[in-house]
Amino acid sequence: MNCVVCGAAMHRIGERFDDRYGYPGRFAVFRCAACRHIQLAASMSAHQIELLYTEYYPRSERGLDDWHPPDRASGLRAWWHGARASAFTWVPPTVRVLDVGCGFGESLGYHLSRGCDAYGVEADANILRIAERHGLKVKHGLFDPGHYERSSFDVVTLDQVIEHLADPVSVLRGIREVLKPGGQLILSTPNPDGWGVRLFGNRWIHWHAPYHLQFFSKLSLERAAAKAGLLVERRQTITQSSWLDFQLCHLATYPLEGQPSGFWSSRRPRTMAQRVALRLARLPQQLGVIGLLTRLMDALQFGDNSVYILRRPTS
């Protein structure tokens, strides 16, 4: 298997299965010796990807009244919780913005509240009922730069999305096409060089097979950006404190292969043992340990989440 970023040969480092929602199968994981990119071997058609997200992802369980745009993040409380881990929080007001992989569409509501001309694209068909209810400008399907005018957006965001892409370099090139000269791409993605993967190994929550296909090292992201004609202006690790809480709950309810997790999915009722384990797993959050540890790891640049700001050159 060759690296999707640099083309070098990759070596197999293990296998993963869907330990959240129970999608069947095992998927081999490979690492590139040249740029340290990690890649999941899961080849799916556009139709299979749509079914994966529409039928297995939990948005199908959410009602129309569950749609709540996030509040604006600022101050010490926002810093403590790692609110700036999300790409949408870096978008300035009153710009024309495209959110690729907009999920349930809450980010679009956030942008609209700040005077932005906001657009979204999403593979999960559950977005259609939300877009109709709230008047959002969303295209259903995979991102296609041909659907938008060239050089028409001030900002494009990929918020926990680039790791889901089968061909990330091609998507980055498409984003460059729709960005204005000098426009920004803001993305967030799990950090495979952080402390979490080293401590939790195969049970790190961000393996998330087969939804997460790509895991970018700092070097592989820089190379992917360069191939797409984009410049990396900034990179730092900023992680939501809740992620570590989720990680501990994930460990407490870890499922057998092919079964949904009692923590992530409502399709599998929790056993008494799991309910007890979850209460114990939540103690570090209640004691404030999780926030402290997450901020420390981010300060050392070993956090679980990387935020990148890329720019399309003006010439």
Image: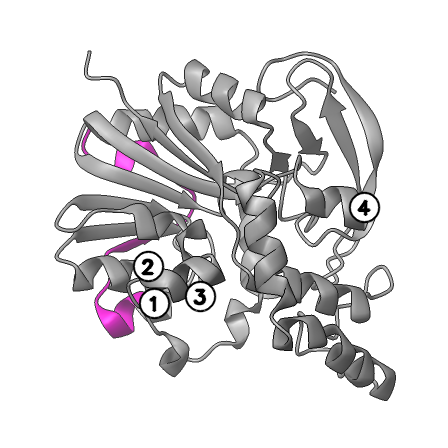
Q: Amino acid at mark 3?
A: Asn
Q: Amino acid at mark 1?
A: Pro
User: On the image, numbered disc 3 is attached to which residue?
Assistant: 126
Q: Nearer the viewer, mark 2 or mark 3?
A: 2
- The label shown at residue 107 is 2
Q: Earlier in the sequence, mark 2 or mark 4?
A: 2
**Which residue is at 20% across, 11% downward?**
315
Q: Secondary structure at mark 1?
A: loop
User: What distance separates the C-alpha of mark 2 from that of mark 1?
Assistant: 7 Å
Q: Secondary structure at mark 2?
A: helix
Are discs 2 and 4 less than 8 Å apart at CB? no
- The label shown at residue 201 is 4
Per the rendered image, the range of residues in magenta is 131-150
36 vs 175, left or right, is right
**Residue 203 visible in rendering:** yes
User: On the image, numbered disc 1 is attached to which residue?
Assistant: 70
User: What distance separates the C-alpha of mark 4 from that of mark 1?
Assistant: 32 Å
